Amino acid sequence: MARRRRATRSSSKAGLPPGTLVYTGERERDKTQISIIDYDAETLQELPASTLSACLQRRDTQQVTWVNVDGLHEVDLIERVGVGFGMHPLALEDVLSTQQRPKLEDYEDRLFLVLHMLSWDATGDAIQSEQIALLLGPRFLLTFQEKGGDVFDGVRERLRSNRGRIRKAGPDYLLYALLDAIVDNYFTILEHLDDRITALEEEVSEQARPSTLHAIHAMRREMIFLRRAVWPLRDVIAELERGGCPLVDEGTRVFLRDVRDHTIQVAESIETLRDLLTGMQDVYLSTINNRLNGVMKVLTIITTIFIPLSFIAGVYGMNFQHMPELHWRFAYPAVLVGMLAIALAMLWLFRKRDWL
Amino acid sequence: MARRRRATRSSSKAGLPPGTLVYTGERERDKTQISIIDYDAETLQELPASTLSACLQRRDTQQVTWVNVDGLHEVDLIERVGVGFGMHPLALEDVLSTQQRPKLEDYEDRLFLVLHMLSWDATGDAIQSEQIALLLGPRFLLTFQEKGGDVFDGVRERLRSNRGRIRKAGPDYLLYALLDAIVDNYFTILEHLDDRITALEEEVSEQARPSTLHAIHAMRREMIFLRRAVWPLRDVIAELERGGCPLVDEGTRVFLRDVRDHTIQVAESIETLRDLLTGMQDVYLSTINNRLNGVMKVLTIITTIFIPLSFIAGVYGMNFQHMPELHWRFAYPAVLVGMLAIALAMLWLFRKRDWL
Amino acid sequence: MARRRRATRSSSKAGLPPGTLVYTGERERDKTQISIIDYDAETLQELPASTLSACLQRRDTQQVTWVNVDGLHEVDLIERVGVGFGMHPLALEDVLSTQQRPKLEDYEDRLFLVLHMLSWDATGDAIQSEQIALLLGPRFLLTFQEKGGDVFDGVRERLRSNRGRIRKAGPDYLLYALLDAIVDNYFTILEHLDDRITALEEEVSEQARPSTLHAIHAMRREMIFLRRAVWPLRDVIAELERGGCPLVDEGTRVFLRDVRDHTIQVAESIETLRDLLTGMQDVYLSTINNRLNGVMKVLTIITTIFIPLSFIAGVYGMNFQHMPELHWRFAYPAVLVGMLAIALAMLWLFRKRDWL
Amino acid sequence: MARRRRATRSSSKAGLPPGTLVYTGERERDKTQISIIDYDAETLQELPASTLSACLQRRDTQQVTWVNVDGLHEVDLIERVGVGFGMHPLALEDVLSTQQRPKLEDYEDRLFLVLHMLSWDATGDAIQSEQIALLLGPRFLLTFQEKGGDVFDGVRERLRSNRGRIRKAGPDYLLYALLDAIVDNYFTILEHLDDRITALEEEVSEQARPSTLHAIHAMRREMIFLRRAVWPLRDVIAELERGGCPLVDEGTRVFLRDVRDHTIQVAESIETLRDLLTGMQDVYLSTINNRLNGVMKVLTIITTIFIPLSFIAGVYGMNFQHMPELHWRFAYPAVLVGMLAIALAMLWLFRKRDWL
Amino acid sequence: MARRRRATRSSSKAGLPPGTLVYTGERERDKTQISIIDYDAETLQELPASTLSACLQRRDTQQVTWVNVDGLHEVDLIERVGVGFGMHPLALEDVLSTQQRPKLEDYEDRLFLVLHMLSWDATGDAIQSEQIALLLGPRFLLTFQEKGGDVFDGVRERLRSNRGRIRKAGPDYLLYALLDAIVDNYFTILEHLDDRITALEEEVSEQARPSTLHAIHAMRREMIFLRRAVWPLRDVIAELERGGCPLVDEGTRVFLRDVRDHTIQVAESIETLRDLLTGMQDVYLSTINNRLNGVMKVLTIITTIFIPLSFIAGVYGMNFQHMPELHWRFAYPAVLVGMLAIALAMLWLFRKRDWL
């Protein structure tokens, strides 16, 4: 698993006035990329970033506009886009301040969401986390991503091929489709984690090593962070589904309910995996304990058999002048036989006590 | 206990549009079986699957129709049935996506439930889990099962023999009867688990072995999964009982309250069994600990008795020229007696310290 | 403590239609006993069971009728009584199905309660549990007990001697009086358990043995079951007190509040005793641990003192031709003195390290 | 810390009718003492107990009457006082039944409170607990204490010296003043406990002994009982502050809010101390563990150094005829040097492994 | 980490009447400092403390007045200021009684807040805590700090430079700005703690020492206190944001929501860090355990190899007259070879058992 994620938000903003736009994530070298998709049931246009200002002006259209922004380090550009779409300064600040807690802000004519898009990094064998902010307005949806690359290819495909109801519905349905894609992807993550946990489970009961425990703990840590991303999301989506926001159509709500159910399922799976990890840790500790027991038994058996025998040998190694046994003819073999008898008696005792 | 159930839903659906029908369970070879029972207080007909389409058309009847579908891999057929009975696409998707969390969806004129039917597999000595989806409509009940074989034979028997009020009541009462059969069967599972736990309890205090701990942990894992199936069910049935759904008759509610009580009882029994398992684990660990203590005591007693004696023997085995004791007449027996005295003193000390 | 109570309800009813009357408790040999007490402020009559049918007919009386049924295995008789007093089939089923969870069912003109009457079996030194069901109707109270013998003698005495307000009040006050007697008896149980725990507490810190831990665990198990009987009772009585049921008089409510407070007190005492038991287990484990430490210290002290000495003896027991020391005049006493010095130095070191 | 408080209420009342007055506390020898303070903004009179009956008759006065009763074993007297002031029989019963849970009963024109007055017994170095019951009526406050001696001297002083608003306000403000005195005293208790815990904390990390653990556990037990006294008090005072009781003036409510905040603070401090104690127990166990580790290391080092050396000595102590080494000139010193080398090598190895 | 903060409030106030002003914090030598800032959108004046009384009189101004008081030991001065601004006596008492729980009191025309300002003391490498009380009135904000030095320099800077909306808005926005500065500073604290925990994490898995465990526990203790400061703050700010207080403008609420979100984030980070610390403790204990295992293995291996060999040497060191082997020509080398074989066999066995 990759190096540990920070548990806390960066404090680089402490002391600045609210609404100050500072990007707190990792600086990437790539330029900020903007892509625009304009669609209705009949037509779909993918526009270049350069048309953005035109796009801002013509907002009385009946078409739905999805503006996706990849990369957040060009703060000025982000601000221009945000202000252009009527974003509240605090929301704009939240876009740039990564490591936010998932949240939903309802600014009456704008709906603002922050959540985390997770993906499984096959090369690093680790979870990649990326903050994504969504702004839902009357006929548009604005999405801000930290980096390029996302889990929305399926949604784009459906838009282009006009499959399902996505082209017929408004931007709230697009919002749902993106949320659904993100949450569905959580299942992929969970599946990867589940596979690793299954592997650890076998390792624990067969050949528990210190590294196994470290792996269990690294896993538990991942779970803590995953949980922190998912639990508030539950409330966010429930609020979205329940809430009286006019931007979200009644017909979209049943779909949001579905996403909410999936989020609950993700949350419960995380709890289950945590319970499994706790159980594994107990098994690990008792495996180690059993081994110690085994080691101690071997030590005890060897010691308790040989120490009395060595003592006898020691006795007959004494140099007293008057030790009559030393001169008897069969004393030596008799002593050897006696020693053997003692050893056998000991072994019999151990077996009776179920130590062997 | 059988191999571990997955903790997470399969992610094979990630990226697909909502409403895409993909069956995520195990593929069975058997054909999908459809059975239809048409009844009212006077008559009961068991119709072949071929009459399904006829059945779909004539829905103005006053008879209650129970359509049961066994096996979900013929996705087209499932879709045709579902659409025929006016099922919401998302509900249809949930039918096929096994490993759902128990849930209740109220689509005004349709009531959709997903839950898990458990059964005890006597041959494999394990819990078998199967997802079951129920769709309640005005005069019909539709049930989808993953596999053939269920716990509804008692209900069918009552339908056929016209015992109790089942034939007089509507499809909501049939729904109740099926839920009751499923929940009653949970008690059978719990009884099996309780028996196993009682057996483990005796094993733990008499002859605790590593395998005992593994059995305890396997049991705890079963409990985690069982709990996950039962806890949301509680809310589902409570919502069904409380809720203002017009499809559920006022008279049926008192029966649903009974099922809810049973579900709570199942949930509490699971908690009790979990508590017992936790207690057993503590007993196991302290039993193991006690054994280690016993082993250490034996080692210590043997060592502390013989090491001083061996030392004495070693002293008189030294080859110094001027060791007057070696030439004394009764030095040897005196040393032996002295050794015996030391050993007895040691034993007395151990007994006084309560080590023997 | 007696053998373990089952954690789960018997499943012998799985598959039967609701309302099927099956007695799930232990079969006793005694006949079902019915006793009837008819009273108002002026008169009190104790009627034989044979008058039951007469009693059922004349229900327009202003007298309060308390019918008590001991023993539940004569299912037909129970059914006749229940139906006679207008009991709902599901309630009747609950009467017979022992190991119910405490519950309250409000059937408008009937109030049905199930709870557990506990008593301390002085001979077996164990808690005896018995399910008791109460049906409150307009002018009557019906009670069903599994076995003969109960904690209601004080109530009967008060009825007969016309002490307090019991004869002046209606059947709801009688219900309260019985509940109060049952809950008061819980305190007796708790006192017995408290005494045992106090005894265990002394045992643990003075002479902890494996049997002590087993006793602690048996006690914790009793607590789990006790808790399961008492916690839902809290809600039941609170609902009874709060609820808008017309069968319960406003004046009786203040008394029910008192019972509710007692139930909460019982529940909290159980939690306190559980906490104490958890603490005792920790003390036990650390006592055992300390002993192991003591054993290891003895082993280590003896070993580390004698092993170097034995080594020295071994060196001078070697048979080399050229070992000048062996021929020195005072070598032997010098070596002995040296050994003594080493032993004393070791002891001083151990004392300094606080091991002695 | 003193001997353990019982976890459960005495059961000596089981079976008695409600309203039966039995004093369940310890019997003290002192007579029940009654003191009466009659005051308004201008005058204050401290009346002898003999004026009580006069006081009961003249209740139309505008003066506030505070009747304080010390000692509860004269049941008849208590009853007379209680009935005189219009106390509900159940409340009167609660006065005498000590070890009650803190509670508030609102009898419309009377407000009844039970709580615990704790004090620190400097001689026994323990917490002293005493139940106190308060009855608030239109122009009077009645307080019942188990024993003489209380924490109200400050309040009396303020009454006599007419400091603050206490003389101007009604009996509800007096009630507040007493509650405030009781809760403020909890802080004194907490301070004593905090001091002891700080002392234990140092002991634990410097010279952990079995007695340390026993002290930690005794402390945790005190915490369990303290918690039980304080947690329900929180709700009681919150209810008093929130509630619509006409006996409590609007202006007094802001003061009650202050007491409530203090109670919450006490409750949180208890939790914090409990957390600290749990942490200390962990430290204790790992300190003990570390010592065992230290002991084992010493044993291992001594043993593993000397056992090989003793073996070599043993080899050259064998009596074979043909052992050429024995006759070599410098064999003996060579063997000694070899042994030294082995010992040094071992020590170097231990140091490398960080064992020394 | 610095010496332990007390878990409990000082009890020096027990027994005093409510409203008695006693400063319970540390006495500092510095004089109480008062600074006054008077501003509106156009002008800003920083006034000397001497103008305070003038300031108190002229309260009909449209300017916003921020009076900041540093140092609380001049009780008379504090009282004069408080009374001058219409502060409730209980609020004034809370200002002086440090170690308060964060709370919000709504006195209709005044809003009173108590919370804790934390700062990281770089020299002592510890958290510094200071209580801060805020009183919001119609056109003024009053702040009381225990010591000089605060986290408000950024806010003062913004006031002076007229950046953002702070000069245009009322005192409620100033209150928000101060809360925001305090909560933002919590992130700085968390970052420091996070760094230390990361350092401990590496220490634990690489070179766990008793001091590591002590550091973990000291950290956990810091977390307990931090949590205690932050959790109630969550409710305080949520109440402020939600509440119907007319002193807080509708437009300010959206900003308070932002602070509330940050507080929740702080609270969650604390929980996460606590979870991490718990996990680290487990890792520590198992590391220690593993080491013990390692030590025991070394002991066992050395002992079980050499004890049998020593025994053989002992046998041939016996002085029996008739031991034929002693006279054989190659007995000695044969025995040596035999010993070597035994040792090798042992080593092979250990390797097979995976002990080496």
Image: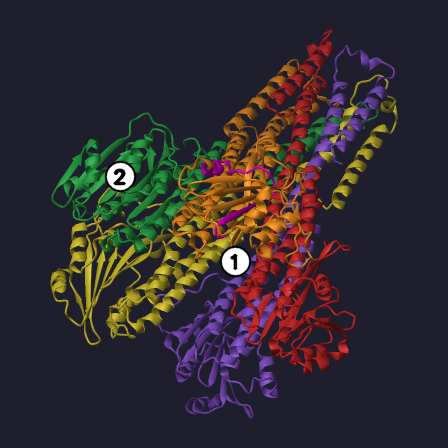
Chain colours: A red, B orange, C green, D yellow, E purple
Chain where mark 1 sits: B
Where does residue A231 sit, x and y in percent of width and height? 58, 59
Question: How dense is the environment of label 1, judged by Cα within 10 Å: few (below 14), some, or many (20 and up)?
Answer: some
Q: Is residue E253 left or right of residue A262?
A: left
Q: Is residue A97 above or below residue A314?
A: below
Q: Position of residue D352 (x, y in %)?
A: 76, 45
**Image coords of residue A81 (percent x, y):** 69, 78
Do callouts 2 and 1 point to residues on the same chain? Answer: no
Magenta stretch encompasses residue B153: yes
Is residue C72 rendered magenta in the image?
A: no
User: What residue does disc 2 label?
Assistant: C84
Residue B170 in sight: yes
Coordinates of residue B137 in the picture (x, y in percent):
50, 52
Looking at the rendering, the stretch of residues picked out in magenta corresponds to B137-159
Q: SS at mark 1? A: loop
Inter-mark Cα distance, 2 to 1: 42 Å
In the shown orientation, is residue D42 left or right of residue C300? Answer: left
> Which residue is nearer to you in this view: E156 or A261?
A261
In this rendering, the label closer to the viewer, 2 or 1: 1
Q: Residue at x 57, y 21 (%)?
A: B341
Q: Choose top left, top right, bottom left or bottom right for residue B50.
A: top right
The amino acid marked with disc number 2 is Gly
Q: Which mark is residue E185?
A: none
Image quarter in which the N terminus of chain B is found? top right
Q: Is residue A139 left or right of residue B355?
A: right
Q: Amino acid at mark 1?
A: Tyr
Q: Which residue is mark 1?
A: B107
Residue positioned most to the top: A329
